[in-house]
Image (cartoon, rainbow, N blue to C red):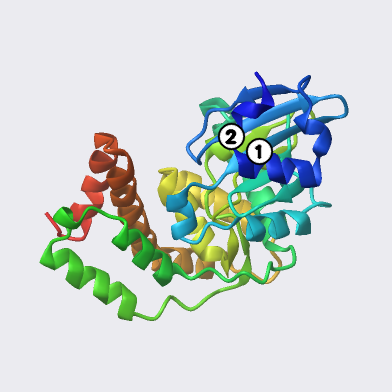
Amino acid sequence: MPVCRIDAELRSVLAQFLPQALQESVALLPVSGLSGIRWRLQGVGFDLLAREASAKKIQIGVGRRQEFRLLRMLNDSSLAPRPLGFSARWLLIEWVPGAPMNSQGWEKVLKTGALAGMLARLHQRQRSGYPLNLQALYEHYWVSSDPDRRSPSWLRLHKWFLRQHLPVSIRQALLHMDVHPGNLLYQQNGGLVLIDWEYAGDGDVALELALLFFGNRLTVEERECFLGDYVLRMPGLDRNHLRWKVDAWLPWVYYLMLLWYESRWQQTGNQDFIALGAPLHRYFSLI
């Protein structure tokens, strides 16, 4: 596939950071994903992924400059892909071999403590300097939702969340904020790599765990096993106190996910997002 098929901004960032990728002999392969357009570029001496941030994601604060700088801070960690360059819309990263985690692999990394260990390593890294602003994210998602679905009761709930103080943090750290099997690569050497860092920033570790637990529908047994493995690797954290902090974040996570489903429905028209959001509408007594 000729490189001319890609847009002008991507050609520009390639010319700046990796000009050899513009040669006609380069293999250009589309890669499926939920986070905008992706191209894999393969040539002599390089294998990279070019990831786009859509206009909608830029509107809600997804920035390739921030993601590039954050990934560069993790260069020595083996936790994330190595960044190569960026523009306003595009991020160039090294291609990471491996496949998204399947259900058996996910169950294994939960039971063995591998996922808990990975997040503990991340949460002990230097913070990025990009603090998460959850309430600003709420507002962005609200604006991008379907106006016809915004009921008076939902507006009251939205304003309530914007007025409230966030739960008191148990420990501030660099968070990934989108940990699920599709964002984990299980490598041949047994290592784990997290991909898709566009939502990452600094925040409370209990928020990360609340998102992990709810977003992946972890059972009570799985949550307890994870917490036990995690606190063993996080000096100074008490398991019971951490559990209480995670529970304090859950309503905030529920509301974040409700808004995300509604925003995705407005963007795609996919009825699956309405179905996914329905239990949260019921939780908040919106239907």
Rendered position, 202 above or below 81: below
| Residue nearest the observer in this picture, 53 or 25 | 25
Q: Tell me which residue sits at (65%, 28%) in the image.
A: 4
Q: Label 2 belongs to which residue?
A: 38
Report the side of 142 relative to 127 (left or right).
Answer: left
Task: Looking at the picture, tell me which residue is in the foreground, 231 or 281.
Answer: 281
Q: Earlier in the sequence, mark 1 or mark 2?
A: 2
Task: Tell me what residue is drawn at x 41 percent, y 50 percent.
Answer: 214
Say which amino acid is labelled 1.
Answer: Ala
Residue kind at label 2, given as amino acid type: Arg
Residue 243 in percent (x, y) is at 48, 63
Q: Residue 281 in the image: state x and y as whole percent.
A: 20, 54
Q: Residue furthest right?
A: 45
What is the number of the mark on residue 50?
1
Q: Residue at x 47, y 69 (%)?
A: 245
Callout 2: 10 Å neighbours few (<14), some, many (20+)? many
Measured along the vertical axis of the image, is residue 36 above or below residue 154? above
Residue 157 lies in quadrant = bottom left
